[in-house]
Image: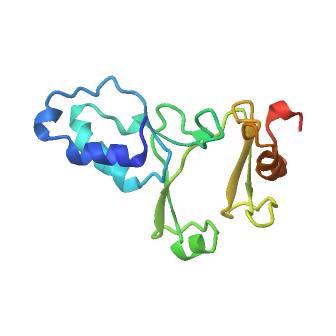
Amino acid sequence: MAPDFGYLWCARRISDQQLERIDLFSLTMAVTGAERIKPSTLDSFTRRFAPYGFSPQAWEPSYGMAEATLMIISTRNGVGVTVARFDAAALERHRARPDPDGTALVASGHTVDLRLRISDPQTLEPLPDRHIGEIWASGQSIGDGYHEQPDATAATVHVVGVAPASSGR
């Protein structure tokens, strides 16, 4: 498991001589997340390490938050990477409009046992499909709030309408 920059660092910095001692044939899962996942990084790493056993099916793009135990969403093991392209101008307007020649973005998969909502950060209202906003999540692996900070918790955690499962809301 590493953020995008960790895989990019490996692809650029591990020497050919060091690669000769690497055996990745038994690796079945390579989780990447914690920052924007770039298709170019996944391609570079895969090209560099494929001769030593790395399979592109091992990729598990994911998304997490500090308030969650680890992951909010992730791909299933063995599925690999899904890249979709979107109109860059639409993305600037917080819309996700597919465009075969547009900006490549990596899909992070699906959630398990969590409730998600995409909301407008100013109005706090849910957004329709294909709109870009804040990701609000709740479930048993999401924190109930900020430690000894009830005002911050009330203002940010319980406002979402998808409050943590343990709070009874």
Q: Nearer the viewer, residue 144 or 161?
A: 144
**Residue 63 shows in this picture:** yes
Residue appearing at x 82%, y 61% in the figure: 125
Q: Residue furthest left?
A: 17
Number of numbered markers: 0
Q: Nearer the viewer, residue 100 or 8?
A: 8
The C terminus lies in which quarter of the figure?
Answer: top right
Q: Quadrant of residue 94?
A: bottom right
**Residue 47 shows in this picture:** no
Residue 91 percent location from the top left of the image: 58, 70
Q: Residue furthest bottom?
A: 89
Residue appearing at x 72%, y 44% in the figure: 137
Q: Is residue 130 above or below residue 152?
A: below
Residue 138 percent location from the top left of the image: 75, 40
Q: Is residue 137 above or below residue 106?
A: above
Residue 162 percent location from the top left of the image: 81, 45
Q: Residue 151 vs residue 133: left or right?
A: right
Q: Is residue 148 above or below residue 35?
A: above
Q: Nearer the viewer, residue 1 or 154?
A: 154
Q: Quadrant of residue 74?
A: top right
The N terminus lies in which quarter of the figure?
Answer: top left
Q: Residue 105 vs residue 65: left or right?
A: left
Q: Quadrant of residue 168?
A: top right
Residue appearing at x 75%, y 35% in the figure: 139
Residue 63 percent location from the top left of the image: 56, 44
